Image (cartoon, helix red, strand yellow):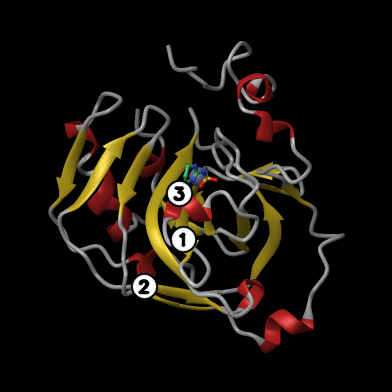
Amino acid sequence: MAAEWGYSPTNGPDVWARLFPQAGGARQSPVDICTSIASSDSNLEMKKLTFAYESQSDLRILNTGHGWKVEAPQSGSRLEGGPLGEDIYQLEQFHCHWGETSAEGSEHTVDGRAYAGELHLVHWNTTKYQSFAEAAQHPDGLAVLGVFFDVGNESNDEIEKIVSTLSEIKFKGQFTDIPDVIDPTTFLPSGLGYWTYLGSLTTPPCNECVIWIVYKEPITVTEEQVTYH
Ligand SMILES: NS(=O)(=O)N=C1NCCCN1
Ligand SMILES: [Zn+2]
């Protein structure tokens, strides 16, 4: 039977390396971002991080058993500049991590503080590699934009388009189509300052193939939007 990884003491991050060797590697994610030791890099300011996405409708959303994932391969999308050198990265999918309560849920933490949730926009290097699967085998294969969720009184309209479909996919493996048009640009905060580091997938197989770009400014969602069960 395929190994069922999870977050319990018997199948969680502390034991993932037994079945997924890369989980024991030297550049594992997530990390706690210590703002006092994070250094600014003038090169990154010179090569501005830029992104371009298409709006798409009828995107498929899947219950992964650990959250929701929207499959959004966009050949017309481009993420480039900043820490990505001369390579162009293309959007493949986006998904969300959240917790039992809004006091926790993000994967990355900032000076030990967790946010209510964290959205990941996953891209792959189309300059060097021929497929997402191939890119995930290389240290510069993927680029993931991380956006923290803060809980407030304002509902996020774009996130609502997604979470409003979750009642149709209550169980692992179920999927449905999102009828609304989704523009990934709207998930990004207005302030575009970010932290970046070389890391890994945060879930098995934990490949050390990700250039992480974690936005400093969270976006606001409601409690209901981020504590869905
Ligand atoms: N949370 S994460 O690092 O994005 N993990 C991923 N695992 C499978 C492929 C896409 N991303
Ligand atoms: Zn993720």
- Of residues 67 and 137, which is closer to you in this image? 137
User: Is mark 1 in CB contact (under 8 Å) with mark 3?
Assistant: no
Which amino acid, mark 3? Ala
Residue sitting at 49 percent across and 63 percent down? 129
Badge 1: residue crowd in 10 Å (few <14, some 14–19, many ≥20):
many
**Closer to the observer: label 1 or label 3?**
3
Q: Is residue 221 above or below residue 11?
A: below
Which amino acid, mark 2? Ser
Could you say which quadrant of the image residue 37 lies in? bottom right
Which amino acid, mark 1? His
Q: At numbered mark 3, what does the secondary structure look like: helix, strand or loop?
A: helix
Residue that badge 1 annotates: 123
Q: CA distance from mark 2 to mark 3?
A: 18 Å
Q: Earlier in the sequence, mark 2 or mark 3?
A: 2
Could you say which quadrant of the image residue 56 lies in? bottom left
Q: At numbered mark 2, what does the secondary structure look like: helix, strand or loop?
A: loop
Residue that badge 3 annotates: 133
- How many labels, in total? 3
Q: Earlier in the sequence, mark 1 or mark 2?
A: 2
Q: Is residue 130 above or below residue 85?
A: above
Extreme residue in the bottom direction? 46
- Of residues 9 and 84, which is closer to you in this image? 84
User: Is mark 2 in CB contact (under 8 Å) with mark 3?
Assistant: no
Give percent across and percent down for residue 163: 28, 44
Left or right of residue 108, residue 162 in this image = left
Could you say which quadrant of the image residue 66 lies in? top left
Badge 2: residue crowd in 10 Å (few <14, some 14–19, many ≥20):
some
Residue 77: give its label.
Answer: 2
Residue sitting at 28 percent across and 38 percent down? 62
Give percent across and percent down for residue 124: 48, 61
